[in-house]
Amino acid sequence: MSLPADLQQALQQLLPALSSPNNEIRQAAEESLNNEWISGRPDALLLGLTEQVRGNEDPATRSFAAVLLRKMASKTVPGRDGKQVDLFLNANPDVQTHIKALILQCFAEETVNTVRNKIGDAIAELARQILEADQQWNELLGGLFEASKSPQASHREGAFRIFGMTPSLIENQNPELIKGAFATAFKDAEFPVRISAIEAFDNFFRSIRKSQHKQYYGLLPEILATLPQLKDNQDDDNLSKILVSLIDLAETSIGMFKPMFSDVVRFSIGIVQDKELSNTCRQNALELLATFADHSPSLCKNEPTYATEMVTQCLSLMTDIGLDDEDASEWNDADDTEADESDMNHVAGEQCMDRLANRLGGAVLLPPTFNWLPRMAQSSNWRDRHACLMAISAISEGCRDSMLPQLSAVLEMVTPAVQDPHPRVRWAACNALGQMSTDFAGVMQEKYHKTVMLHLIPVLDAPEPRVKAHAAAALVNFCEEAEKDILEPYLDELIHRLLSLLSNDKRYVQEQALSTIATVADSAETAFTRYYDMLMPLLFNVVNRPNTAEDKDTRLLTAKAMECASLIALAVGKERLGGDATALVTAFARIQQNITDPDDPQASYLLHCWGRMCRVMGDDFLPYLPGVMPPLLELASAKADVQLFDDDEQIQAMEQEEGWELVPVRGRCIGIKTSILEDKHLAIELLITYAQQLQAAFEPYVLQVLQNIALPGLVFLFNDPVRLSSAALVPHLVNSFRKVHGVQSPQFGQLWRETLVKVFDALESEPAVEPLAAMFQCFYECVDVIGQGALTPADMEKFIVVTEKSIIEYQGRVQGRLEEAQNGEDDFEENDEMLFAIEDDQTLLSDMNKAFHIIFKHHGVAFIPFWERLLSYYQEFLRSADPTQRQWALCIIDDVIEFCGPESWKYQEHFLKHLVQGLSDDSAANRQAAAYGVGIAAKCGGPAYAEFVAACVPKLFEVTQHPHAREEDHIYATENACATIAKILKYNSSHVQNAPALIAPWLKTLPIISDEEAAPYAYNFLTELVQRNQPEVLAEAPFLFDAIVQALENEVLKGEVAKIAVATGREILSKSGANPAQVVQSMPAERQEAATKWFS
């Protein structure tokens, strides 16, 4: 079988035309390829290209024909059954057979290595298609194993290249055969063969099941044996390639490295410190070492030299900075302060320190780090001082708990550097103070505000623009976590100096000053009012100046001024803003009308500014909504920009493009333009703001937004954040429509029916756990908006169906994690990915729980027949070793008792035992859920529960006496038990043995200072005891008065309950005869102010 001569000639003329530099010739050739060949004679095209690979005398043409064969073979076309299929698989079976035989001959006979590689790529693509279609290519595997033993090195290399591209070829082959082939290749005399084999093994190892990994561990020493020779030869490129493969292997199965871990660490450290090697090679070795920490912290902690050596090398790399810019003049003159330095050694060192801190923790990392830092801080070399400060920035998040007790000492090391003679050291000092303000948020602001502010504010006057801008940026970190009272004493000087930056010659300094002022205003709130008259006119000057197409460089500055003005408006409020509100939104509208460029930064800033002005102005914003909504709706309605790339050059180009995500699929790449999706997500978030703020006034837009944006967004599979924000938007839209039409109106009924169908569809089809939790939240928030009658029996049935599906899938994920933990690897550790997955599942269970809670709340016993279907799952969860599962089931029990009352007693055999066991659970959350359930049974369960709840009293006292009862993680369990005892003594005291004797010990379970739901029950019961002149109360007057003050101070009592508690406090003092002044004086100093406030 061969192509007719006329077609061969036509194809020979087509190939050079397709690669012609002349656009007209090339475009005509592409049209011919698409219209005449692909559409008209696809089999002839594939066959002809294969013959060109075999017979053309020109190596470049053979290479191009092989590349084109791979591309054309993978082109999708309608198949014989109408479904899309790859062009090769759609070819006549005889043509397929001939092409397979011919291309293998080409591979065997080709003499030019680069051409053979292209032929191998084409073979790999054909093999992929054949294997995915469950077809056979028997000759290929035997041919490749033969080629792997060929006397010609290029054949051996080519065979492993194909194995690497199509690992599924050998996944199911005899493991001994595979191990033998790889072991031989790893010792090959030719390094290109070894490299090709190692990369192939990397791909193969990642493609097989985890349970198969162990049998290939023995190949690692053979791989490692190649490294010393490459290092000795200073062969950076091949050394880097093997290191990349080792990184992949470590990410896939860290246990493989355990037997040789010390040797691998020692050798990799040697590469990192070898300055004769390329930076890429050294950084790849560092990445391998960091990967070990990412995937097995315990392995690294147990290696005596690991932490010390890693810290030493990271700090050394961090000093590799500014080598050709000793005085930092180039650095300071640069206008691009965001230049990409990700490939620089100092950045690699910083990032690695950050990862080590997060994975190893302060107990391991701080000793070797602070063995170096004090010396580096005092070094005469500015690079050492810079590295010291950047190391502190890098490790503070991961080492937070260990560094907190030493924070004063660390600050004493950092703060002098703001006056360092070298500008880059001063910049690094600002960076450290800013990072620490975030990582030690709360402590830095409350305890060290004076230290930070008095050192950072003067740096705003630094002579170097980059230093003063970075000081302003560090102040953003500090101020956004600071309370108004902390900032107020510093505002005058801070605002004065920030204002001076607005006149700086460097635009990035002006932009940063505006961002910092905006953050200060946001945190200072009403305290910022006194600067309004000083700042707002300046901001109006910026936003009102003409903005022409030539003013591109000032657009970001204008955007920052808009942001600053809108945040100041939010801080000072509507009343102080007065007529400036109208002037401001008018200016924003004018800027919006003049935006024409898609990359104009003002557009995205405006979206946020409009949202803030809506929050400030409320209903007064409505006249501007018609101008605001069209561009917002356009963004929110955007479709995904998805493109298919099968050209290597195209793919490489797209990898360098910002705003694109590339996903490999079946030998090709799908590109998704993420920048569009980010804008879509932002627009939906802002729609939430408008619907939430305007409520009924947003009704004119509800149907359009719901039908075109929110409901389609629930199943927008290209982007998780879009689905999350869409799920959050739907309940606000339902609420807006309800406020205008009412739940009984036909319009609302139709909207809710259509919405519920889509929400159920999303619940049923959502593939990811985090968005699935958001769908449950969307569902229960909608039901809560509507209230009683939101769901029909058919709806309840549907909810149970989709929930059962989610529970079964959840159980499958849990089982999968258990199997992974038990797959035979001795060093199994939960990595970040698994921890995030567990956290997502916990969130899912929580939101599923809330859905049950809301349905029971509004539908009560009507929901019970449907809920019963899941009873077996609850029982299974109650017996689970996983505390999260037990908590989920206990909370469901609580809801059934609370909202079904006496009707719930018929399930007592399923409930009571587990509530009692829950009171002794190791998990504080479960003790809390059980205590709440017993309390709600006392209050709502009726007489049937009386003896049960009375019998629980001793257990409840045990909960309040837990060794950690008053600690943060246990306080809610303690306080729920306190409130539950109060409920039992109030509602069921006749069944409690010697109930009066329990009053004195119950009083000692107070105060309640955290749980706003539990507090009113306890303090209202205390009020009853006072009104009954209970002697135990009067005997504990000072203690109980203090307990009331603590509850008021912590705001767990509010409104009428707080007023009653104050009256009770006064009554306690009055009836007991205690001296109020003495009682207050005996209280801790920090509470005396609260006592005076409430009881003066």
Image: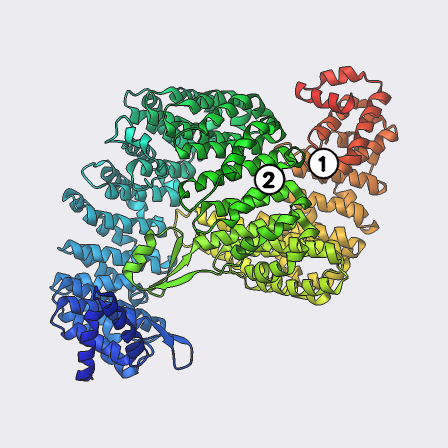
- Residue 746 appears in the figure: yes
Where does the image place residue 697, in percent across and percent down from the top left? Answer: 69, 51
Q: Secondary structure at mark 2?
A: helix
Distance between the alpha carbons at the discs numbered 1 and 2: 63 Å
Residue drawn at point x = 27 percent, y = 75 percent = 32
| Residue that numbered label 1 is attached to | 957
Query: What amino acid is at disc 2?
Result: Ala
Residue closest to the eye, 232 or 826: 232
Do the numbered discs 1 and 2 sit on residues whose CB atoms are within 8 Å? Answer: no
Reply above or below: 1086 against 761. Answer: above
Query: What amino acid is at disc 1?
Result: Phe
Residue closest to the eye, 570 or 7: 570
| Residue that numbered label 2 is attached to | 583
Where does the image place residue 944, in percent across and percent down from the top left? Answer: 81, 51
Residue drawn at point x = 34 percent, y = 40 percent = 339
- Quarter of the image containing the C terminus? top right
Where does the image place residue 1082, in percent across and percent down from the top left? Answer: 72, 16
Whichever of callouts 1 and 2 sits on the residue coming sooner in the sequence is: 2
Residue closest to the eye, 652 or 306: 652
Reply above or below: 490 against 722. Answer: above
Q: Residue 776 occupies which quadrant of the picture?
A: bottom right
Where does the image place residue 194, in percent across and percent down from the top left? Answer: 19, 55
Q: Secondary structure at mark 1?
A: helix
- Quarter of the image containing the N terminus? bottom left
Q: Residue furthest right?
A: 1028
Query: Looking at the image, is mark 1 or mark 2 nearer the viewer?
Result: 2
Residue drawn at point x = 28 percent, y = 78 percent = 37
